[in-house]
Amino acid sequence: MKTVKIGLMGFGNIGTGTYKTLEMNREIIKKNTGMDFVITRILEKDTERERGVQVTRDQFTQNPEDIFKDPDISIIIELLGGIEPATSFMLEAMKNGKHVVTANKAAVAANYDLLMDTAADHGVIFKFEASVGGGIPIISALTSVLQANDYMEILGIVNGTTNYILTQMTEFGSEYEDVLKDAQARGFAEADPTADVEGIDVANKLAILMTLAFGIRVKPEDIPRVGITGITKEDIQEAAQKNEKIKLIAAAKKDGEGKIEYSVKPMRLPADHPLAGVSNEFNAIFVRGNAVDELMFYGKGAGPLPTGSAVMGDVIEIARKTIQ
Ligand code: HSE
């Protein structure tokens, strides 16, 4: 049986969730693919943290070159987060002939063309399913089974942290600060949760979705954006009295002339709107294509295991395509 050796960069919440997904399902993956997947090296400073996984000290390194130059490693997973050094590491991995998988929406949104072109130039595969919607296979859907469509509209809840905060404030009257801490403890929030609550994370994800659906490059910082920090308990109560819920919505729509209009902002939705029923860390993405018509994708958009599921899915897909 072939062994597929993987290098992991970043062993935080998502790195641990990816490792756990593989530990939990190694046998079933072996049975389904005929390959054994092993994370052999991990780039991480914090070697002491208790992660609840079996990992040996010699798997850790603090030198990325140990992973780039390891001839046995064929796939590198980048889960450091942030634009740099993550982008440079991914490019270096590709230049060393490694396939790359990431969940890093900030890096993909900022450097999409550079990453895709470098992968193509070096004959390697670059995949980023986990960058939008956590466990929801929205990237695969848009770029494979739905690719015969002219996309008309994308509308969604694509940030688990803010949806968790808004849900808890709405359902239980919880305090913003308490729920944010809870979301951090559950591994939903970014290292700096400002990116979540100010809508920056949503703008990164919308930029990626617009690239894939409409073929346009919009810098995340050019997307009109309002986060949830200005939403008060009173706003939520007032909406509830009118049978409405407040949700942070990413929207992109093609107008009659083919121009795309886009925004990230909190919106009041009637309680019977399909997106109003999306609670906690769940995400949902509504897509309208001219052939398929309306579709809705729903699932856990944040959290170690749902995101780990998408990361490992990409890894397995690459191995199926490249390893005989
Ligand atoms: N911080 C992100 C969220 C993680 O809450 O949705 C998943 O991209």
Image (tube, rainbow, N blue to C red):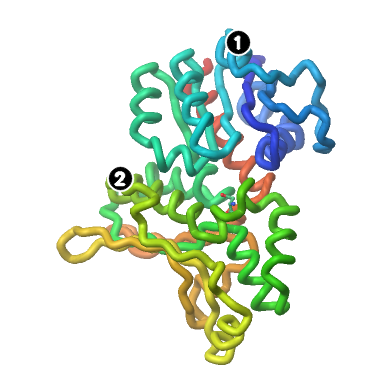
Number of residues whose C-alpha sits closer than 10 Å to that of mark 2, classed few (under 14), some (14–19) or many (20 or more): some
Q: At numbered mark 2, what does the secondary structure look like: helix, strand or loop?
A: loop
Find disc 2 in the rendering and name its residue. 217
Image quarter (top left, top right, bottom left or bottom right) of the N terminus: top right
Query: Mark 1 and mark 2 in contact (Cβ < 8 Å)?
Result: no
At 56% from the left edge and 22% from the top edge, which residue is drawn? 75
Q: Is residue 159 above or below residue 235?
A: above
- What crowding class fits label 1: few (fewer than 14 Cα within 10 Å), some (14-19), or many (20 or more)? some
Secondary structure under the numbered disc 1 in the rendered image:
loop
Image location (x, y in percent) of residue 251 = 38, 63
Q: In the displayed structure, does residue 234 sit left or right of residue 144?
A: right
Give the x, y percent position of residue 106.
Answer: 48, 43
Q: Percent position (x, y) of residue 321?
A: 47, 24
Residue drawn at 72 percent across, 30 percent down:
26
- Disc number for residue 241: none
Amino acid type, mark 2: Arg
**Left/right of residue 44 with respect to residue 259 in the rendered view:** right
What residue is pinned by disc 1? Answer: 70
Toward the viewer: 209 or 191?
Answer: 191
Residue 269's place in the image compared with 199, above or below, is below
Instruction: Estimate the x, y position of residue 148 in percent, counting from the top left.
Output: 29, 48
Mark closer to the chain start, 2 or 1:
1
Q: Of all residues shown, which one is farthest toward the left? A: 257
**Looking at the image, is 68 positioned above or below residue 185?**
above
Residue at figure coordinates x 45%, y 29% from the top left:
126
Residue that appears at 29% across and 60% down: 152
